[in-house]
Amino acid sequence: MSPKKTKADPSLILLDIIRGYSVFHINDKEYYFKHFSIEEMLRFDEFEKIEVEKAKRSGIQTEKELIESAIEIDSWSIKQEESIKALKWTIDHSTKALSKMSDAGQKRLFSKQIERDREKLEEIEGKRRKICGYSAEALGGQKRFSKMASSSLFCDIQFTKKIKEKEIESASPLIFSKFAELSKRDTLLNAIYRTYFFDVFILQSKNPLSLFKADFLTLTIFQKNLLSLAKGLLNKMTNTKIPDQILGDPIKMFDYEEPKDDEGAKVTHGVDDLKKKMRQRGGELKPEDLLT
């Protein structure tokens, strides 16, 4: 049985972001993951590009070359390559259509359709990753991640004692997991709105960097994302007539788009069309069904 997923606690997410580090517990030891500043991320970008170029000069093929070779020997196809683009487009547009639906039953059906599309996408992308697993880009990405892990994991809260090389392997997955958690838009919106942060942000909205006593280069990437989303949420709440039924839900408020003129009728009509197409296709949708 897989471990039960727990919802991210908004207060703990905010705490990690404002202090600029996360604490990991491994084998009764505490490790500290120092969050990356914008400058550090730019340096990692530079490092990765250099490593990709080194790999190419040493004769390692690029993703494009590996895909072209795979197509030539029929282990991959242009159709599969195009299906990745089509599925991403479909998922994006289906998700937008879902947000405009009000009928609970239809929302469940549509959600299942989106989930099936995501599973198909993951399956096809998994096959593609196997083909491109030894590309110059993959090698550059691996070296980048290794550098990120070794430069951000410490044994002390002062960030003076680097983690030992042999311990990096067990701690690296925690960095990946924490990075993903702190990068999720919905998680950040909850941390912004369901904690003390939003009230203080409103008071400091003209100079938000002062909240972290940072400048552009020293601000962490998670702090940057938090401020950006807080600004977007404040703008939405200030300039949009939010329906009473979604007031207090930061995610729904952030996603809400006020209908213009007869747009409300058009949206209802469009959603009804999608419902009809879903019924005709036995609950499935194709990219062309979402074209307007």
Image: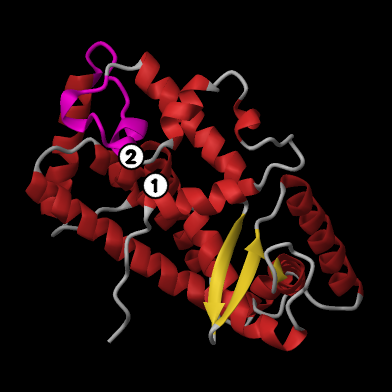
Q: Is any atom of residue 165 visible in this view?
A: yes
> Is 46 placed left or right of 144 in the picture?
right
**Which of the 4 image quarters holds residue 33?**
bottom right
Depicted 160 relative to depicted 259: above or below: below
> Is 184 placed left or right of 169 in the picture?
left
Q: Is any atom of residue 292 visible in this view?
A: no
Q: In the image, is residue 113 part of the stretch drawn in magenta?
A: no
Tag shown at residue 186: 1
Residue tagged by mark 2?
Answer: 251
Badge 1 element: helix
Looking at marks 2 and 1 on the same chain, the residue that comes earlier in the sequence is marked by 1
Picture quarter with the C terminus:
top left
Badge 2 element: helix
Q: Say which amino acid is labelled 1.
A: Asp
Q: Position of residue 125 (x, y in %)?
A: 50, 70
Q: Which residues are magenta?
A: 242-263
Neighbour tally class for label 2: few under 14, some 14-19, many 20 plus, Cα within 10 Å: some
Q: Which residue is pictured at 41% across the width and 65% down the height? A: 121
Q: Nearer the viewer, residue 81 or 127?
A: 127
> Is 36 placed left or right of 199 in the picture?
right
CB-based contact (under 8 Å), mark 2 and mark 1: yes
**Which of the 4 image quarters holds residue 34?**
bottom right
> Is 279 placed left or right of 32 in the picture?
left
Q: Position of residue 213 (x, y in %)?
A: 68, 35
Q: Which residue is pictured at 77% across the width and 40% down the height? A: 217
The total number of labels drawn is 2
Neighbour tally class for label 1: few under 14, some 14-19, many 20 plus, Cα within 10 Å: some
C-alpha span from label 2 to label 1: 6 Å
